[in-house]
Image: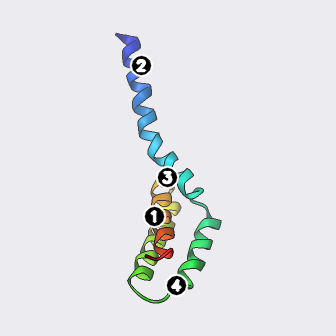
Amino acid sequence: MTKLLGVIAIAAVAFAVAPAEAAKHATGGCSSANLEKTETAIENMADGDGKLVAQKEIASAQDSMLNGKMGACSMHLNKAMHATMGK
């Protein structure tokens, strides 16, 4: 029974960490270099709804990074990057 609880605990930790790691690898990580590249792409966008969405996402990414929430930062950065690609 004790071994089963240990395996369950390890699995729970793995499932809790996996989404943050996946977000980090999907975007190349939340770094100041990636934030800068995305900000440059946003500046070059035409004014409109897409640009507003991207600006809000990059602001949220920066806030998350400053607060040490790297998973959330990666998620917002990824959304901002997708917004710069247009539709």
Depth check, mark 4 against mark 2: the one in front is: 4
Residue bearing the label numbered 1 = 76
Depth check, mark 4 against mark 1: the one in front is: 4
Depth check, mark 1 against mark 2: the one in front is: 1
Depth check, mark 4 against mark 3: the one in front is: 4
Q: Position of residue 77 (x, y in %)?
A: 50, 65
Q: What residue type is labelled 3?
A: Ala
Residue bearing the label numbered 2 = 6
Q: Are marks 2 and 3 in contact (CB under 8 Å)?
A: no
Q: Helix or strand or loop: what does disc 4 sit on?
A: loop
Q: Helix or strand or loop: what does disc 1 sit on?
A: helix
Q: Position of residue 37 (x, y in %)?
A: 62, 72
Q: Does label 4 or label 2 sit earlier along the sequence?
A: 2
Q: What residue type is labelled 1?
A: His
Residue displayed at 60% across by 79% down: 40
Residue 23, numbered label: 3
Quarter of the rendering containing residue 43: bottom right
Q: Where is residue 53 in the image (x, y as percent from the top left)?
A: 40, 76
